[in-house]
Image: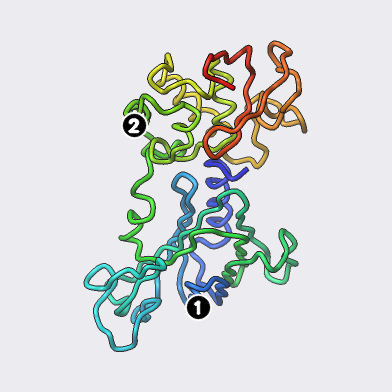
Amino acid sequence: MPEGDTVWNTARVLQRALAGARLTGSDFRVPQLAGTDLTGWTVRESASRGKHLLLRLTAPAGTPAPGATPGSGGTPGAGGTSGADGTAAGGTSGGGRDWTLHSHLRMDGAWRAYAPGERWAARPAHLIRVVLRSAGAVAVGYHLHELALIPTDQEESLVGHLGPDLLGPDWDPAEAVRRLAAQPDATIGEALLDQRNLAGVGNLYKCEVLFLRGVSPWTPVGAVPDLTGTVALAQRLLAANRGRWTQSTTGSLHRGQTSYVYGRRAQPCRRCGTAIRKEELGERVTYWCPVCQPDRSAP
């Protein structure tokens, strides 16, 4: 499940594979970046912000800006403009040589790193959206969303709306609580998924956090007894899974034992034995125990 910890892990995979490397080729298979050539560009670093991946690059001096009209003049971030498709328009890189390749995994996206000559076996070829080659590695992006190449100093246009990043160096739990509390009538289940409140929680962690706190997903934010404790638990769970691909909230990494309620519809609650329920909440499904997480507003 591509939640904040998965994206953090993916960023580290790309960091190990490409950081400091000069690209020997690129292949974009999305309309907005078709024809974009990053050959000769250097990968500075790979970072994550919530569920967003940010691959930061430096273009060789004098390289025309992606999407630029030859002879148009100007520099991105200093007179150049950003196109509707997320690529900069107009000018050469000149004094604005730092760029960011942004991608979002959503529910089904993935990046994989391969050794040169290794078979790309992770997904079917028709799902490939971008290929980045260096002398030592090949990075392949499958079914990526919101793929865009923008000047690094314009990253905020894509991620500035996000709340505090649970796995970021600037994690601010007080600010996350403040943002959640600002919408007291929203259900806590929906509020935790709103990336403008805190960035990185997905459906798995939403369900698991609320079970462990004994809070029904349908509880209004204003009625949650301890928002600070809820936010702190969410951060601890994501941090505990950082650096590994198996997501566990129970402490067990064995198949079928990694969650309390998520993905366990009709199975017995690990605490009370009641059948776990599954219902729609907003645009997503939610799993919960009606005994351990009582609430009169639940279906």
Amino acid carrying label 1: it is Thr
Task: Tell me the residue at 54%/38% (across/down).
Answer: 202
x and y percentages locating residue 269 in the rendered image: 71, 17
Q: What mark, if any, has residue 179 been given in the picture? A: 2
Q: Is residue 54 above or below residue 258?
A: below
Residue 267 placement: quadrant: top right
* Mark in the foreground, 1 or 2: 2
Helix, strand or loop at mark 1: loop
In this picture, residue 190 sits left or right of residue 74: right
Pointer 1 local density, CA inside 10 Å: few below 14, some 14–19, many at least 20: some
Amino acid carrying label 2: it is Arg
Q: What mark, if any, has residue 168 been given in the picture? A: none
Task: Tell me the residue at 49%/63% (across/down).
Answer: 147
Whether residues under marks 1 and 2 lie with C-beta atoms below 8 angstroms apart, the answer is no
x and y percentages locating residue 42 in the rendered image: 46, 69
Q: Quadrant of the N terminus?
A: top right
Disc 1: which residue: 39
x and y percentages locating residue 203 in the rendered image: 57, 36
Instruction: Give the Cα separation between the discs numbered 1 and 2.
Output: 42 Å
In this picture, residue 139 sits left or right of residue 95: right
Q: Quadrant of the C terminus?
A: top right
Q: Nearer the viewer, residue 257 or 298?
A: 298
x and y percentages locating residue 276 in the rendered image: 69, 22
Residue 148 placement: quadrant: bottom left
Helix, strand or loop at mark 2: helix
Residue 237 placement: quadrant: top right
> What colour scheme was applied to this rendering of the protein?
rainbow
Which label's residue is closer to the chain start, 1 or 2?
Answer: 1
